[in-house]
Image: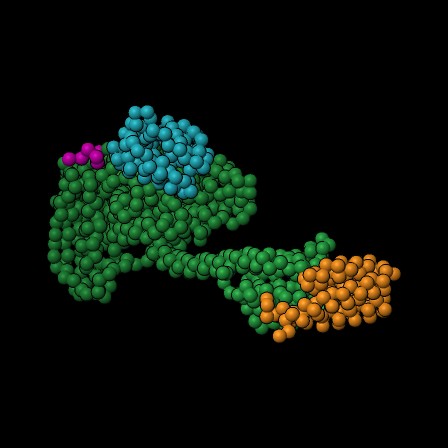
């Protein structure tokens, strides 16, 4: 998927930033249901994009949302943000290779 | 590469949606995308894709609800839905299936597995498609077949019911399905006023079984109307069926010849279960199958020997197809002969028996019978039967009526040939005689059997005074007839114009010792005697009847007025 | 329903054994039983000892066998008829065409 690859990277990065925003809002509002759904969706695309660490953190957050045990949520969201910052740097440099 | 499919991808996550549509379109399919369930349903209705990849958790409308709606819109067509999910809990997977999902695809996506799943689902989809097409085809064929059967049944009914099954002395039950199981019910008046009745059951099922009924009915009605005897009708039916039906297809049948005037019934049973002659006195005589079915034997080997029983008013003959005895109950038991005999034995009022048998069958099987033929014929007073006028196929032109002719039928011919249909056809060329055709036939038949039985064969009608003697009389008749080499019966016919009308004079003589009115007493010696109705009948039906006067034999006259 | 045919050692006689229901469903199998044999038997035996039911289609099939075996010159014996089967054969007067034992 040579042609679509840079577009896919862009899409993932933009989409992920939106999702992080949703995650943060849900965590602050202590909305377990929204937290669970956002984490679940983010988990899926992370696994597809080859970011297993990030997918693993999302899964933990989804579980917490499902059990409505939100005490760990701030910590997990922060971990996800940190991990995503790393993934973003990696993907951006990957993206550079396709800029002609 | 598999057939190009149109595939709908419903996924709220833009990156996943893009990843998936890239994989799928690279596999050669057309891709439609939706970012939530509501969009997916709308797109499905609009584009009717053949396969759906559906994310389970989506905003606005989730995948479960969207799957349910899509399945509903798709109806009978199989639109496979593959759920895209990273759900791992068993419960969630169950929900996917319950919503109508056909398979799962877990994240992260694997191109090879996705392709294999799409192919597998496409096979399933096409299989369902084929099944539906075949089902529709079968339904169409079935509808077609039913229409054909309705038409065939209408034609069949017209042919087979052209007789007198609606006569007041006949009751019958024939389930519609039985017709296409090869069951056949026929009844027709003879020119003499008697009645031929046939209950038949062809081998096999369906149209092939029913088809033989048409030629059989044609022979039965044609020959009966022309005055042929029971034996002659049977011979012709057997010969015709043998000629046209394939080996292995035949017709079990019981045939009755009832004479209301002479109060006797002749019975021939080839292959049907016992019928019964039930008398008002409570007596029950089985009418046993003594012959191979019709259409089995070559004409030369066919046996037309029938049994003769005297009848009294109110006596009834019951005939039944094997469908009656083979009526099944819920345990798979057959109704059988024993139960039938119990019903007959329990009967206290003969006219109610037909209904009692019907009820017993329904009670036994718990439902309406679909393969049953049951027939009851009773002996009623002759006057209760109204008979249709004889039908003629010619154009109704007048024929000459100033002629005379004499016929002599001798030994060998008397054994094998019944001259009555021949004579009747000749005489009914005379239009003025047609309204009296029935009476004419009855008179000729009486005079002929009198000449043959007493004159030529020398039988004594005094024998017929009781039931045993009656049977003995007919036994002797067939023995003597079979051995007959000499003797004759002569018919002298004379037609004279009379005014604008005319007159027929018939004289019948035989080789016997001369006409003996003692053998046919003017008045029956005893109203219940089984003989002696003959001459009374001749006198009643003809205009004039005389014997002696220097002429051999009996002389009868019929006359008619113009326009008659 | 199962139909087996067994030629005698000298090939003069063919025994056809019918198990279960002998009705229209047996049509093809019954024909195969006498048409697909290598020998040309002079006599036929239809063994009905394991036959539970026989209907009028079966009577038709027996007539087909009789035709195959030479019509009026056919030598066919129907063996081991149970009372129900015997009754059906009797009603149709098949003893005039077959030896029934």
Q: Is residue B30 visible?
A: yes
The quadrant of the rendering that contains the N terminus of chain C is top left
**Magenta span contains residue A90:** no
The picture quadrant where one finds residue B295 is: top left
Instruction: Give the residue drawn at x 75%, y 69%.
Output: A19
Question: In this picture, which residue range is highlighted in magenta?
Answer: B480-485
In the image, taking residue B48 as reference, residue A86 lies left or right, namely right
Q: How is the image coloured?
A: by chain
Query: Hey, which residue is sitting farthest bottom in the picture?
Result: A100
Q: Is residue B498 visible?
A: no
Instruction: Give the residue drawn at x 25%, y 40%.
Output: B298
The chain assigned the colour cyan in the figure is C
The chain assigned the colour orange in the figure is A
The quadrant of the rendering that contains the C terminus of chain C is top left
The picture quadrant where one finds residue B152 is: bottom left
Q: Position of residue B165 (x, y in %)?
A: 38, 53
The chain assigned the colour green in the figure is B
Query: Hey, which residue is sitting farthest top in the picture?
Result: C9
Q: Is residue A43 above or below residue B473?
A: below
- In depth, the one of B260 and C74 nearer the eye is C74
């Amino acid at each position: 998927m040579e042609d679509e690859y840079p577009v896919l990277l862009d899409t993932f990065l933009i989409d992920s930033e939106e999702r992080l925003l949703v995650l943060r809002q849900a965590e602050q509002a202590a909305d377990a249901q929204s937290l669970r759904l956002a984490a679940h969706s983010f988990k899926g695309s992370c696994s597809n994009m080859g970011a297993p660490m990030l997918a693993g953190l999302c899964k933990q957050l989804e579980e917490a949302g499902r059990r409505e045990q939100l005490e760990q949520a701030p910590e997990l969201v922060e971990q996800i943000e940190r991990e995503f910052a790393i993934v973003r740097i990696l993907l951006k440099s990957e993206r550079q290779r396709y800029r002609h | 590469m598999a057939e190009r499919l149109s595939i709908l991808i419903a996924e709220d996550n833009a990156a996943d949606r893009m990843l998936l549509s890239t994989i799928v379109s690279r596999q050669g399919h057309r891709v439609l995308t939706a970012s939530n369930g509501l969009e997916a349903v709308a797109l499905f209705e609009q584009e009717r894709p053949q396969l759906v990849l559906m994310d389970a958790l989506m905003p606005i409308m989730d995948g479960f609800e969207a799957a349910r709606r899509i399945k509903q819109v798709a109806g009978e067509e199989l639109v496979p839905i593959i759920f895209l999910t990273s759900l791992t809990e068993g419960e969630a997977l169950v929900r996917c299936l319950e919503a109508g999902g056909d398979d799962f695809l877990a994240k992260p996506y694997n191109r090879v597995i996705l392709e294999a799943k799409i192919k597998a689902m496409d096979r399933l989809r096409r299989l369902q498609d084929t099944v539906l097409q075949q089902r529709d085809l079968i339904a169409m064929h079935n509808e077609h077949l039913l229409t054909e059967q309705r038409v065939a049944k209408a034609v069949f009914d017209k042919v087979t019911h052209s007789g007198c099954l609606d006569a007041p002395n006949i009751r019958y039950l024939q389930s519609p399905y039985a017709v296409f199981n090869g069951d056949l019910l026929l009844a027709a008046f003879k020119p003499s006023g008697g009645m031929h009745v046939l209950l038949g059951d062809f081998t096999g099922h369906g149209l092939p079984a029913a088809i033989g009924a048409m030629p059989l009915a044609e022979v039965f009605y044609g020959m009966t109307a022309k005055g042929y005897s029971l034996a002659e009708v049977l011979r012709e039916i057997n010969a015709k069926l043998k000629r046209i039906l394939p080996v292995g297809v035949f017709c079990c049948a019981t045939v009755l010849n009832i004479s209301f005037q002479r109060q006797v019934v002749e019975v021939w049973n080839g292959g049907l279960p016992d019928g019964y002659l039930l008398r008002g006195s409570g007596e029950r005589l089985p009418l046993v199958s003594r012959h191979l079915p019709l259409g089995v034997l070559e004409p030369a080997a066919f046996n037309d020997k029938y049994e003769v029983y005297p009848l009294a008013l109110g006596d009834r003959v019951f005939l039944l197809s094997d469908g009656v005895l083979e009526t099944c109950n819920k345990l798979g038991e057959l109704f059988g002969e024993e139960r039938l005999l119990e019903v007959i034995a329990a009967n206290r009022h003969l006219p109610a028996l037909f209904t009692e048998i019907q009820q017993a069958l329904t009670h036994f099987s718990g439902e309406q019978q679909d393969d049953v033929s049951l027939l009851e014929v009773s002996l009623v007073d002759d006057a209760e039967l109204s008979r249709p006028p004889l039908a003629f196929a010619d154009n109704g032109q007048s024929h000459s009526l100033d002629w005379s002719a004499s016929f002599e039928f001798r030994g060998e011919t008397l054994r094998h040939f019944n001259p009555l249909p021949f004579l009747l056809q000749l005489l009914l060329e005379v239009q003025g005689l047609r309204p009296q055709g029935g009476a004419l036939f009855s008179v000729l038949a009486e005079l002929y059997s009198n000449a043959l039985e007493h004159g030529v064969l020398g039988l004594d009608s005094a024998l017929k005074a009781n039931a045993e003697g009656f049977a003995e009389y007919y036994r002797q008749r067939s023995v003597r007839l079979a051995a007959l080499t000499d003797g004759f019966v002569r018919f002298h016919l004379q037609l004279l114009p009379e005014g604008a009308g005319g007159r027929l004079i018939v004289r019948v003589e035989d080789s016997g010792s001369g006409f003996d009115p003692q053998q046919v007493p003017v008045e029956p010696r005893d109203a219940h005697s089984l003989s002696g109705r003959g001459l009374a009948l001749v006198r009643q039906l003809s205009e004039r009847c005389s014997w002696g006067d220097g002429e051999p034999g009996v002389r009868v006259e019929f006359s008619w007025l113009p326009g008659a | 329903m199962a139909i087996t045919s067994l030629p005698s050692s000298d090939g003069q006689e063919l025994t056809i054994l019918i198990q279960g229901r002998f009705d229209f469903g047996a049509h093809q199998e019954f024909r195969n039983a006498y048409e697909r044999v290598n020998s040309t038997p002079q006599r036929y035996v239809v063994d009905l000892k394991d036959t539970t039911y026989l209907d009028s289609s079966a009577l038709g099939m027996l007539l087909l066998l009789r035709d195959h075996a030479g019509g009026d010159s056919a030598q066919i014996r129907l063996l081991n008829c149970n009372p129900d089967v015997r009754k059906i054969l009797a009603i149709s007067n098949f003893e005039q065409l077959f030896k029934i034992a």
